[in-house]
Image (cartoon, rainbow, N blue to C red):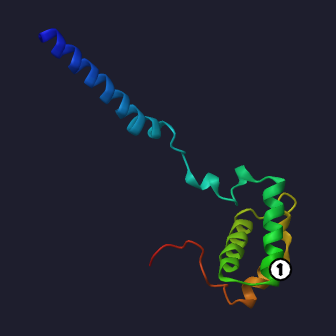
Amino acid sequence: MNRKGGVVTGVILAISSVFFFIFIGFPLFNLQPNDQDNSPFSTSTQSPDTISTIANDIDSCVSNPTSDCDQEMLQVSKFCDQNKGQEQTYPFCSDTRVQMYIEQRNMAQIKVNGGGS
């Protein structure tokens, strides 16, 4: 009887260890060091397709302004400010329509993801 109880306890411990690893350990091993790496404006994810998409979004926003465009144009402006001197890498940064859009929509003083205060 003791042997049967020991086997059952061992199986229960083994199963609980597997579940612990699956639900707790595995997600911890897969954490990304910085969630901003997935940003469309991250330098590590810039590809010709992403740059083309941003340029197309600028075209769309200039022709049809929306509140979503406001946020996107502010992000483009902030990204370009942080990456000054790299206009050849990011051609949309030399597009004067972004700054004109921001000025026309009176968004020059709005902060992107500025937090509280």
Question: How busy is the neighbourhood of tag 1: few (under 14 within 10 Å), some, or many (20 plus)?
Answer: some
Residue 92 is left or right of residue 41, and the answer is right
Q: In the rendered view, would you say 92 is above or below 105?
A: above
Nearer-the-camera pick, 91 or 5: 5
Residue 116 found in image quarter:
bottom left
Q: Residue 70: image x %, image y %?
A: 68, 80
Nearer-the-camera pick, 72 or 90: 72
Q: In the rendered view, would you say 45 is above or below 16?
A: below
Is any atom of residue 93 visible in this view? no
Q: Residue at x 54, y 73 (%)?
A: 114
Quadrant where the image shows the C terminus: bottom left
Q: In the rendered view, would you say 56 is above or below 100?
A: above
Residue 63 is left or right of residue 17, and the answer is right
Q: Residue at x 85, y 73 (%)?
A: 95
Which element type, helix, strand or loop, lies under badge 1? Answer: helix
Q: Residue at x 72, y 75 (%)?
A: 73
Q: In the rendered view, would you say 73 is above or below 47?
A: below
| Residue that numbered label 1 is attached to | 97
Residue 18 is left or right of residue 44, and the answer is left
Q: Residue 111: image x %, image y %?
A: 59, 77
Residue 41 found in image quarter:
bottom right
